[in-house]
Amino acid sequence: MARKTIRSIPQERAFMPVQDPEARARNFEEVALGFDRENALLECERCLMCPQPACVEGCPVNIDIPGFIAKMIGKDFEGAWNHLTDSTLLPAVCGRVCPQEEQCEGVCPVGDRLEPVAIGRLERWLGDQAIANGWRKTSHIEPVPFRVGIVGSGPASMACAADLAKAGCKVTIFEALHAPGGVLRYGIPEFRLPNSVVDAEIANLEALGVEIRCNTLVGRLFTVEQMLGEMGFDAVFIGAGAGTPRFMDIPGENLNGVLSANELLTRCNLMHAGDFPSYDTPLGLGKRVAVIGAGNTAMDAMRVSLRLGAEEVHCVYRRTEVECPARKEELHHAQEEGIQFHWLTTPVELLGDAENNVRTIRCQQMELGEPDESGRRRPVPVEGSEFDFEADTVVYAIGTSPNPILGQTSKLRLNKWGYIDTDADLATSLAGVYAGGDIVTGAATVILAMGAGRRAAASIRAYLGIRDSAVVYAADRNGFDNSLFGIDLAEKTFTHVQLA
C-alpha cells in the first residue's frame, strides 16, 4: 500500500525585522524592513497550496496567490512576479498598505491554528525585487484611434490608465497636485510607503506611454464636458478620490492650530514639512498634539506628529480599542512608539488663548450602548464626565467626503452623500464618462480602488468597441528571443509577433 507523504509546515511566521520603536519615532525611514530572500522562502513553505484556495476569494482582485507562491518555492522569482502582476499593478504598494488581515490572510486556513501565511509580505518582497532588478513585462501594443482622459492619479486611475494603455489607447492623466500618485503620495507617510516605491510604479505607467499632467485641476481649468468636446477625448475616467476632510462642528474648530489629517499629511509628504531647513516649509505643532479618530489615517497623523517633534501625542476615540478601525499592525506600532490613547472619549469643545490659538481640548467620557447602523455599539455620553487636557494642535481624522468641484462644474449625477452615481459598469450619467474608487464608494482600500479602475477600463474598452484581448509574455530565459504570443479572445486566433 502506497504511503501518503504529509508535508509539515513551519509553525511560526518567518522573521521580518522592524526598526526599534524609540529610534523610528523620530525618523521617516521605513518601519517594517521586509523579508530577506531566505525568510521569504521560509514563509512560502507555510502555504498549504489549497485546491480551492479561500485566499483567492478573499482578495478583491482575485490574485492567484498559491500560483505565485508555487513559483517562488521553485525560485522562479521573476515568473512569480509576472504571475502576480497579471492581477495587480502595484504589488510593492499593496504588499505594504492593504489590510491583508481582513482579506486574503483573514481566510487563510493556516490561520485557524497558527498565524496565517504572510501573503502581503511575500507580495511586497516580489514587488521590491522587481523594482531592484528592473523587471518589466514586454509587450507589443497595437495603437487604436482613441484618446482617454483620466481625472486624478491615485490607485484607481493608475490601474485604469495601465489597462487602457495596454489596449492601445492614448491616455492622459490630469493631477491637481504637483506630483502624481494621489493618496499614495500625499496621504501615506514614507515610513509606511516610501516615495521611491511610488516613483517606480509611476515610471512603469509612463513606460506604457501614459502622459501625466500635474498642476491641473479639472473643474477649474476645464470641465469634464469640455474634455469630451473641444479637448477631443473619446472617454473619461474619474478617479479623483474623496479628499475633503470632515469635522465635528463643535465650538472652537476655527482656532489656529486646528487642522485635518489630510492637511497634516499633505504638508509633510508633498511640502517636506519634516525637512526643515532644507525646505523652508516647517509645520509647528507645539509640544502636545491631539488627534481625533482611530483609523489608519489617524495612526499616520499621530506617528507623523511624533516625527515632526511633538513631545506628547494623544489619540481621542469615542469607542474602545476593540472597535478601533485601524489595522492591528498600525495600532501596535503606534502603541510601541508611545502614543497615548484615550478610549471611550469624545471632544465637545476646543478652547483657545487670547491670540485665538488652540490650547485645550474639552472631552467627555462615553459608554457603549446598542449597536448602530454599522453594527458597532453606539457611544453614549456619560453625564458629568467632562475633563480637559492641554493641546497645542488638534488634528481631525474622522473621515472624508468627495471634493465638490466636479459636481459643481459638470452635469454628473451625484448621490445624496455627494459621491458620483454610477451603474454596475461604473458608467456615470454622462455618456462616455466612468468613475471608480473613493469618489464613488467613499474611502476604501488601495486594492479595491485598483479593482474599480480595472473594471472601468473594461467598460471603457467595450464602450469604444475595442475587442478584448490577452497577451502571453515570453522572456529571454525561455528561449523565445524576446518574442510574444497574442491570443485574441474574441476571434479565438493565435499569433506570434517578433519584437524589435
Image (cartoon, grey):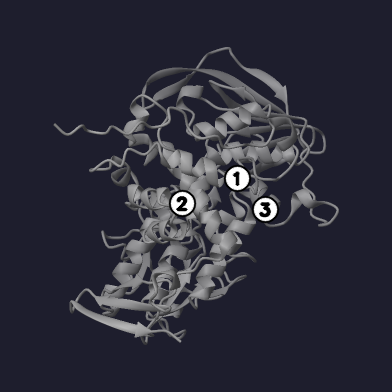
Q: Residue at x 63, y 56 (%)?
A: 195
Q: Note whether residue 50 is visible.
A: yes
In front of the other: 198 or 471: 471
**What count of labels does the image hold?**
3
Pointer 1 or 2: first along the chain: 1
Q: Note whether residue 399 is visible.
A: no
Where is mark 3, residue-wise?
Answer: 269
Q: Residue at x 43, y 85 (%)?
A: 232
Q: Quadrant of residue 131?
A: bottom right
Dot 1 crowding, Cα within 10 Å, few <14, some 14–19, many 20+: some
Q: Amino acid at mark 3?
A: Asn
Q: Residue at x 52, y 64 (%)?
A: 153
Q: Nearer the viewer, mark 1 or mark 3?
A: 1
Where is mark 1, residue-wise?
Answer: 192
Q: Amino acid at mark 2?
A: Val
Going by the picture, which residue comes out furthest to the right?
Answer: 277
Is residue 369 left or right of 121 when viewed as pictured?
left
Q: Which image quarter is the N terminus in?
A: top left
Is residue 114 left or right of 331 when viewed as pictured?
left
In front of the other: 428 or 275: 275
Q: Amino acid at mark 1?
A: Arg
In front of the other: 203 or 226: 203
Above or below, 28 relative to 167: above
| Residue 22 position in % (x across, y down) | 73, 30
Find the distance from the CA under tag 2 to the CA under tag 3: 18 Å
Q: Quadrant of residue 166?
A: bottom left
Pointer 2 or 3: first along the chain: 3
Above or below, 173 relative to 168: above
In front of the other: 474 or 419: 474
Where is mark 2, residue-wise?
Answer: 446
Find the distance from the CA under tag 1 to the CA under tag 2: 14 Å
| Residue 391 position in % (x across, y down) | 73, 30
